[in-house]
Amino acid sequence: MNPAIIIIALLFFTSVIMALAMGVAWLHFGRQRHVLSWALSYAAAMVQWLANGGGIALNSGGLMALTACCIVISSTLMLVGVRQRSGRPVPWRRLIVLGALVSGGGIYVSLIGDRSLQGMVVPSYVAVLMLWAAAALWPRNRRFSAPEMAFFCMSLMLALFEVGLVVSAAMDLGRAPGQGLALYRALLGLGLPSIYVGLGVAAVMVVAGDLAHQLRKQMRHDPLTNVLNRRGLDEAAARAMAHANRHQRPLALVICDLDGFKALNDGHGHIAGDAALCGFARLLASAVRRGDIVARMGGDEFGLVLIDTDAAAAADVMERVRAEIGFLVLPYAPQTALRASFGVAEMIATDDSLEDMVARADKALYDAKKEGKNRVAIWRAAA
């Protein structure tokens, strides 16, 4: 049996597995656009390998032309998926025009049977797209994750491999196939299966890593308000308290809730109550600095950890929030004016955990409620 057919069969079944894996991931884990793009990319690759095998077995220029078109589609969709995952705009018009031109060139050289040009036109396009994908994969304002690094390296390897194919094909340009064709076939047989499978494994690792990150975020975030939940608060506060102790820096905890929240729920329904919670959470998040912690502790109660902030400064920040909350407009209760009370406690040397601060901030919140609500109270030892 022709060794090329064996290699193509391996690549075909790899594409089948990858298309199925990406399709399942898209269907059952959030229907993310980039996962769908990668599933379609490997589906196009399935057709590509079938056409490639048929073209070799039947010596068919038409099937090789179809192979060229499928390679263009598959590599384009791979780049599209990377850009979608990175949150970058997809230049659809540019990709369509460029892909159409390369496809036309690939169809032409396949039909005329020019092996040198056939080995240069489409691989050049794939090399450019893989370099483009690697650049788009580079994270902004953070480090590479391990799966991203693997995918980045495999994209670069595929780009370099395609460049090697172009160079080897160019060796026979303008003359009968010879040393260049032999090198081209050797590169395909030795390098393509490993790199293709490696890129597929890296793509699966990226999707799995994204899913794990999504699950971790869901475990630590409140689904309604999109701020941390109590578990997320405990973990983030433990790190913040350790840092404050290590560097002898102040740290303040604020416990706050909406005044009359039960009456709002009872009078206008849970939709109005949910809108009030979301608006309150957004106001709290916008009032603090980057690095400060905002969490929903349960019901209408929120907790904030303010870094490098003493109790007096934290009370000033909450006083601004208290003044602004009355201007929030609730779509289902437009005549309702929201009010909130706040209890503030500063970390002291004897605090072993967040619970120690919570107890004092809760006491301050109780004092604010007892004194008439709609106010900010600071826990003081004398009290």
Image: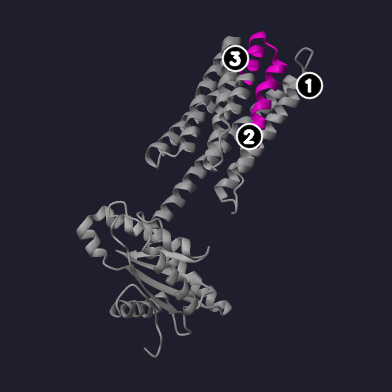
Q: Position of residue 89 (x, y in %)?
A: 56, 38
Question: In the drawing, what numbered circle is on residue 118?
Answer: none
Q: In this view of the protein, can residue 60 be seen by the observer? A: no
Q: Where is 54 relative to 166, above or below?
A: above
The structure residue drawn at horizontal position 41% and vertical position 78%, both measured from the top left corner, is: 357
Q: Where is 304 relative to 56, above or below?
A: below
Residue found at the far front of this picture:
335
User: From mark 1 to mark 2, how far is it between C-alphas?
Assistant: 23 Å
Residue under label 2: 130
The residue range painted magenta reads: 102-131
Residue under label 3: 65
- Answer few, some or many: residues within 10 Å of disc 1's Cα (few below 14, many 20 plus, some between 14 and 19): some
Q: Nearer the viewer, residue 215 or 99?
A: 99
Q: Confirm or deny contact between disc 1 and disc 2 (CB under 8 A).
A: no
Amino acid tagged 2: Met
Amino acid tagged 1: Met
Residue under label 1: 171
Q: Confirm or deny contact between disc 1 and disc 3 (CB under 8 A).
A: no
The structure residue drawn at horizontal position 61% and vertical position 23%, both measured from the top left corner, is: 97
Q: Nearer the viewer, residue 32 or 206?
A: 32
Left or right of 267? Residue 66 is right
- Counting residues from the start of the chain, the first of labels 2 and 3 encountered is 3
- Counting residues from the start of the chain, the first of labels 1 and 3 encountered is 3
In the figure, residue 297 lies in which quadrant?
Answer: bottom left
- Label 3: element kind: helix
Q: Position of residue 200 (x, y in %)?
A: 54, 36
Magenta stretch: dominant SS? helix
Left or right of 2? Residue 297 is left
- Counting residues from the start of the chain, the first of labels 1 and 2 encountered is 2
Q: Confirm or deny contact between disc 2 and disc 3 (CB under 8 A).
A: no
Left or right of 221? Residue 200 is right
